[in-house]
Image: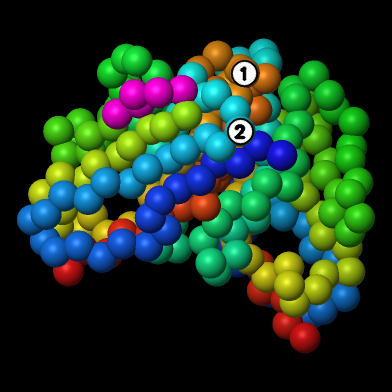
């Protein structure tokens, strides 16, 4: 069975702080994809990143960075110098390369205060 | 880039009536589409997998007679909530898989049953 765990339900930080959102996953598949999505209050899902299970390189995109560690089945997301506009719910997700069903974690609600 | 569009974005219907939500892939063909439901402050839960030209595969606990899914073409899947009740009020969101196995999400549809 596949499972995604986001243990942090809510995080509150002050603007300009760095914040890391944790994601731990479980799968028996050898090939899979991991994702992070942002969901602002309006509801739409904003795609942030997709990572293939064979690619363990960390990635940086502006203030965003991701740390993928297969050994610990984790795919953590760090926002550097957070801004108020980063306030949203962030979902980590896992997709098998077979059926491509995407399983979402419970989400982490991030509040960034000015 | 590829876009998945949902319509309507918001709908209010009376209890006991049926409502249809459309999911369209605008510039690619999607052999597989997925439907999710999200209750307030909860995660996205997969309802069903829709394959073009065949019956949808429903997740455990999802009533197939209540949530009718039709995937009549490579660019359109519809979700019909039959005999809607207030407890069906939710955020419904679809995703579509491209031939390159990339998943794209629609903007979501807010359903309120009164």
Left or right of A34 on screen, residue B85: left
Mark 1 burial class by Cα count in 10 Å: few <14, some 14-19, many 20+: few
Q: Secondary structure at mark 1?
A: loop
Tell me the residue at 61%/41% (across/down).
B3
Furthest toward the bottom, the residue is A114
- On the question of residue A27 being in view, the answer is no
Q: Position of residue B69 (x, y in %)?
A: 28, 32
Tell me the residue at 34%/24% (across/down).
B72
Task: Name the N-terminal-most of marks 2 and 1.
Answer: 2
- Chain assignment, label 2: B
Tell me the residue at 89%/49% (across/down).
A61
What residue span does the magenta drawing correspond to?
A: B70-74
Asked whether the beta carbons under mark 2 and mark 1 sit within 8 Å of each other, the answer is no
Q: Secondary structure at mark 2?
A: loop
Q: Position of residue B13 (x, y in %)?
A: 20, 62
- Coloring scheme used: rainbow
Q: Quadrant of residue A79?
A: bottom right
Q: Which mark is residue A41?
A: none
Q: Which residue is mark 1?
A: B99
Q: Quadrant of residue B42?
A: bottom left
Q: Is residue B32 above or below residue A106?
A: above
Marks 2 and 1, how far apart at CA? 12 Å
Q: Position of residue B36 (x, y in %)?
A: 41, 42
Q: Which mark is residue B27?
A: 2
User: Front-most of B15 and A63?
Assistant: B15
Q: Position of residue A102 (x, y in %)?
A: 53, 32
Q: Is residue A61 above or below residue B74?
A: below
Q: Quadrant of the C terminus of chain A?
A: bottom right
């Amino acid at each position: 069975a596949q499972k995604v765990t986001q243990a942090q339900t809510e995080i509150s930080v002050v603007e300009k702080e760095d914040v890391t959102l944790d994601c731990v996953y479980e799968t028996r598949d050898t090939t899979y994809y991991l994702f992070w999505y942002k969901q602002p209050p309006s509801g739409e899902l904003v795609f942030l990143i997709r990572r293939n299970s064979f690619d363990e390189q960390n990635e940086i995109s502006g203030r965003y960075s991701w740390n993928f560690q297969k050994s610990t089945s984790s795919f953590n997301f760090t926002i550097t110098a957070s801004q108020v506009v980063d306030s949203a719910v962030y979902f980590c997700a896992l997709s098998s390369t077979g059926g491509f069903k995407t399983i979402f974690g419970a989400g982490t609600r991030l509040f960034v205060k000015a | 880039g590829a876009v998945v569009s949902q319509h309507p974005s918001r709908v209010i219907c009376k209890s006991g009536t049926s409502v249809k939500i459309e999911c369209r892939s605008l510039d690619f063909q999607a052999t597989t589409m997925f439907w999710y439901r999200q209750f307030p402050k909860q995660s996205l839960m997969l309802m069903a997998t829709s394959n073009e030209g065949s019956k949808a595969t429903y997740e455990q606990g999802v009533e197939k007679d209540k949530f009718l899914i039709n995937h009549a073409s490579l660019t359109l899947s519809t979700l019909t909530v039959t005999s809607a009740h207030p407890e069906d009020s939710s955020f419904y969101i679809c995703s579509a898989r491209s031939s390159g196995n990339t998943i794209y999400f629609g903007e979501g549809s807010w359903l309120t049953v009164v």
